[in-house]
Every structure is written in structure tokens, then in C-alpha cells.
Image: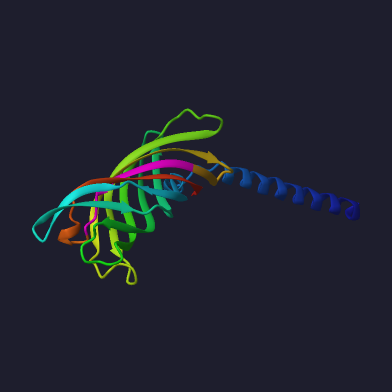
Amino acid sequence: MLNVSRPIWVRNVVLCLLLSAAGSIAKAQATPQTGLDRQLSRLDIGVVASAILNRDSNGTVAINTVPTAVNLHPGNTVGPLVTIRYTKSPYLGFEFNYAYARYTQTFTPFGATPTGGVQQNASEYTFGYVAHFRREFHGVAPFAGGGAGTTAFRPTPGGGEGLSPQARATYYYNVGGDYMLNKHFGARAEFRQTFFKAPDFETNYLTIQKRTTELQPGFGFFFRF
């Protein structure tokens, strides 16, 4: 009898342990999020490849006391846009943007500079408000936002003509949509427009005192914690 009952007793103990373990796992899965988990779930980091489409600007400067019309023609290029976004609720969110682009500012006429252009690195640092609308369209969650910050224009060592770096106050708005590919990864398409005063690199014969704008359509991906 002992030899027969012992395996049954062992199996019963093992069964009880398995049921206890299963209950513990289910309880752990049902445990509410911690405060840190809740805050992280509101964060996402996105990287978008944006086309940088610049608009020309025109103004007048005094060259040798003679009023001279100057045209600013910035080149077009492509650059990355990195966004860290915190969404507390659908209509309450905040974001930090860093954008980078490299292109040439061409001035006509350009004073004594023989090349007629300034090659530069442009870095945007902006903060803004963003709202995500509750209604989705075929899985795409639309958003819109706007904000302000600064853009740093830094002439390059080789093609910057030795001019000084300069920062300009920058304002922007954006509209777009997010599409979740799985629980944590998604695709993002957006359109941005930025506004700032045309850079003159602290040089009087380039100071046209005109505002200009960039159009930035882009597409990329984001990671949600």
C-alpha cells in the first residue's frame, strides 16, 4: 500500500505547486502598473527623415553707402528630425524636437565673397504642445501641435567663408499621423513648417531683416515605452 500511495501523494503535491505557481503568475500579471511604468508608457521617441524646403527672401542693405537689393536663396536638402514626446492624455501632450540639416545660403550680390554662398550646419531645438485626436482613421491616429525654440546656424570650416555662427528664434507647427505596427513600434508621417528671421551671420552686408520659412514633410518611425 505504501508503495502505491506514495506516487499519488507526490503527484498531488506537484499538482498543488503548479496550481500555486499559475495563480502567482496570474496575480503578477494582474498587478497594477507602478508610477514609473505609467510615466514611461506616456513617452515615445521618434526619428523622421524630413525634406527641408527653404523659401527665398529679399531685402535691401547698404554696401559702401549704396542701397543694394540682396536675395537670399537657401538650398534644399534632407535631414533627420528627432522628437521626444510625452502624452498625458489625448489632448494634452508635450514634445522636444531636434532637427539637423546642412545646406548652402546663397546671397546675390554677396559683397566681396567670391563663392557667393555660405555652407552651414543648421540645428533646431524646439519645445511644443501636441494633441492626439481620439478618433482614428483606418488605424492612423492624427495629431497636431506647435511650439518655439531656436535654430543655430553654424558656418562650416571649409565652406563657411569664416563667418560667425548665429542663433535665431524659431516657431513651428506640425500635423501628422501615427500608426502602431505593434505594441511598442509605430510609423509616423508628418508635415512641419518653421518660421525664423533670415540669418546674416553678424555681417552687415547680409542683414536683410526679413523673416523666412521652411517646409518639412517627413516620414519615419517611433518607439513607445
- Give whichever of 115, 171 is nearer the camera: 115
User: In percent of the image, x 28 and y 59: which residue is there?
Assistant: 153
Say if 97 sits above or below 114 in the image: above
User: In percent of the image, x 15 and y 60: which residue is there?
Assistant: 204
- Give whichever of 103, 20 is nearer the camera: 103
Query: In the visual, does 16 lie left or right of 1?
Result: left
Query: In the visual, does 2 lie left or right of 31?
Result: right
- Give whichever of 10, 42 is nearer the camera: 42
The kind of secondary structure the magenta stretch mainly shows is strand
Say if 59 sits above or below 131 in the image: below
Give the magenta range. Answer: 189-200
x and y percent of residue 211 in the render? 23, 46
Outermost residue, left direction?
A: 65
Does the segment drawn in magenta span residue 195?
yes
x and y percent of residue 170 in the render? 26, 48
User: In percent of the image, x 57 and y 46: which residue is there?
Assistant: 28
Q: Is residue 46 visible?
A: no
- Give whichever of 138, 32 is nearer the camera: 138
Say if 92 sits above or below 115 in the image: above
Q: Is residue 123 visible?
A: yes
x and y percent of residue 19 in the render? 70, 45
Tell me where residue 155 sits by quadrant. bottom left
x and y percent of residue 201 in the render? 22, 61
